[in-house]
């Protein structure tokens, strides 16, 4: 029986990249999509730390996903780190943050890591997660992030070409890094344009996340 992976989306622009990654890397998995785009809209109104109310709301969203019979839950938005931590404490299945696997791949490339982001409220939580991950790994690494203004708005308006161009135009500012991460699932569609602009390894979150979730599920199945 195929494992059911529930995908929690806070914006519709993250849906296509992760579906494509599952089709390529784990087509046998049964994926179920849950979308609450109000989460990203309301998170954008909280530019600082995520509020307790938002955490509770996100956990209820995730618990609904678990109630659907999830064997694993994968979150596709990077602005909800503390809420994802809380959710993982309340459900008995693997819960995967969107960028954990990409961080793992990035520090394998070296110590100087760059990141191109398009959603400002996610930068703080992602930076915190990166520093925690680096501390746990025992490897020295630093993160430098560039926020690409207006790219997300262009993508939401259906203009993926401009979204990709705006991101690629900023990439050379990180050309001295050992690796460049594209912060969000939605920015993975700009990977080809960014790779054309720099000679640095460019990492995206969706494929790494699918590989990591598959490994977690197979570990549980073998236990």
Image (tube, helix red, strand yellow):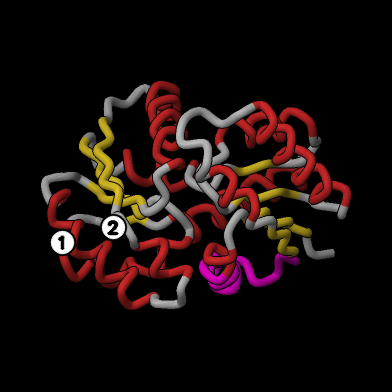
Please give the name of the residue rendered at 24% of the width and 38% of the height, measured from the top-left corner. Answer: 144
Q: Is residue 196 above or below residue 146?
A: below
- On the picture, is 200 further left or further right than 20? left
Please tell me which residue lies in front, 1 or 183: 183
Residue 32 magenta-drawn?
A: no
- On the picture, is 162 further left or further right than 186? left
The segment highlighted magenta reads 16-31
Please tell me which residue lies in front, 201 or 216: 201
How crowded pointer 2 is (Cα within 10 Å; few <14, some 14-19, many 20+) is rated as: many
Give the distance between the C-alpha atoms of the residues marked 2 and 1, in whole angstroms.
9 Å
Identify the secondary structure beneath mark 2: strand
The residue that label 1 is drawn on is 198
Identify the secondary structure beneath mark 1: loop
Question: Can you give x and y, in whole percent of width and height, for residue 75 in the image?
Answer: 62, 49
Q: Main secondary structure of the magenta part?
A: helix
Residue 23 magenta-drawn?
A: yes
Please tell me which residue lies in front, 2 or 155: 155
Q: Are marks 2 and 1 in contact (CB under 8 Å)?
A: yes
Disc ID at residue 14: none
The residue that label 2 is drawn on is 202
Please give the name of the residue rendered at 80% of the width and 36% of the height, measured from the top-left corner. Answer: 92
């Amino acid at each position: 029986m195929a494992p059911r992976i529930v995908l929690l989306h806070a914006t519709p622009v993250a849906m296509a990249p992760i579906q494509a990654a599952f089709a390529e890397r784990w087509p046998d998995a049964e994926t179920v999509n849950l979308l609450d785009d109000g989460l990203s809209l309301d998170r954008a109104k909280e530019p600082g730390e995520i509020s307790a109310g938002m955490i509770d709301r996100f956990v209820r969203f995730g618990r609904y996903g678990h109630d659907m019979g999830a064997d694993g839950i994968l979150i596709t938005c990077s602005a909800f780190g503390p809420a994802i931590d809380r959710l993982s404490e309340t459900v008995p299945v693997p819960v995967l943050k969107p960028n954990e696997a990409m961080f793992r791949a990035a520090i394998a490339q070296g110590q100087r890591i760059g990141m191109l982001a398009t959603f400002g409220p996610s930068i703080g939580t992602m930076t915190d997660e990166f520093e925690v991950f680096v501390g746990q790994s025992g490897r020295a690494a630093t993160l430098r992030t560039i926020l690409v203004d207006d790219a997300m708005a262009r993508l939401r308006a259906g203009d993926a070409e401009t979204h990709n161009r705006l991101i690629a135009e900023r990439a050379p500012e990180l050309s001295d890094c050992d690796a460049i991460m594209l912060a969000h699932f939605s920015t993975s569609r700009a990977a080809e344009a960014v790779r054309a602009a720099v000679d640095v390894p460019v990492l995206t979150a969706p494929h790494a996340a699918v590989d990591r979730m598959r490994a977690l599920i197979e570990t549980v199945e073998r236990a």
